[in-house]
Image (cartoon, rainbow, N blue to C red):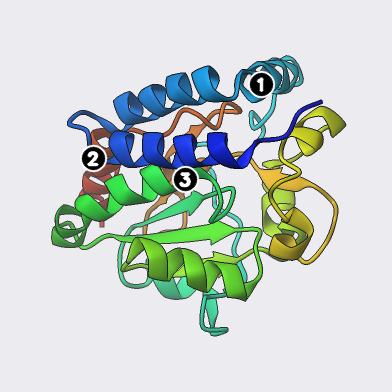
Amino acid sequence: MTSLSPADAERLKLAFQRCRDMEGTLNEQLRAYAKAGRDIFPAYGEAVDRLVARLAENGGGENAPRPGEVMPRFVLPDENGRLVTLGSLIARGPVAVMFFRGHWCPYCRLNVSAVIQAQDRIEALGAQIVAIMPETQEYTEQFKAESAAPFPVLTDLDNGYALSLNLAIWLDTEIQGLLSYQDMARFHGNDGWMLPIPAVFVIGRDGVVKARFVDPDFRKRMEIDDLLKALESASGEN
């Protein structure tokens, strides 16, 4: 099993920058990065394909909250250690609760970059974004600073909230070996190798899920136009 070489890590970094700056939709950027990643680090791309197939066979994410259901409440610390509640967020307007794998994940960084570009339109709808990650405050703070995210980034330590939503998954030993160049135990404060399935839940002021995007393939994300439409619809209900 081969981990990523320093030279290939640099090639991936350059590929990320090209994809982030390219014209196109979020998922076009994600597909371009996935293709570059497969060319540079094919063993990882093939392992991810197997992981995604296993998750799909087991209904990964299917039992997460659906539109029409009440979103379970949370109390989680933000990047500054302040506790944030779902109730306090929806009191101000609709919220998109977004789950990310971590600061190290290029797909998450592309996703956040696209959301930030739409921030003015999100605010014009009276809506908000909140990000949730399984990393310690040190890394949520880093993620927020490096991305210049204007929204809170919350720590879901040990994936407690993600587990309650049926979103948490275990990365098998094959993926662990290929990602050994990432210090996951330090990032998470544990060596459990658990991550959330990236997901989006649009929540109205009544606490009910209005729309969701859940896909066990982390290389796919909710398109920004779909996010805006869902937030606009949720705003119109209030």
Return the residue found at the far front.
7
Q: Residue at x 72, y 34 (%)?
A: 3
The residue under label 1 is: 52
Q: Is residue 86 visible?
A: no
Question: In the image, which disc is placed on residue 211?
Answer: none
Q: In the rendered image, which quarter contains the C terminus?
A: bottom left
Which label belongs to residue 108?
3
Q: Quadrant of residue 25?
A: top left
Q: Which amino acid is tagged 1?
A: Val
Q: Position of residue 190 (x, y in %)?
A: 83, 61
Image coordinates for residue 38, horizontal then vertical, percent:
53, 19
Q: Residue at x 28, y 45 (%)?
A: 114
Closer to the N terminus: mark 2 or mark 3? 2
The residue lying toward the viewer, choosing from 147 and 79, is 147
Report which residue position mark 2 lands on. Answer: 21
| Residue 100: image location, x then y, percent | 53, 49
Q: CA distance from mark 2 to mark 3?
A: 15 Å
Check disc 1 and report its element: helix, strand or loop.
Answer: helix
> Looking at the image, is 102 positioned above or below residue 38?
below
Mark pair 1, 3: CA separation: 17 Å
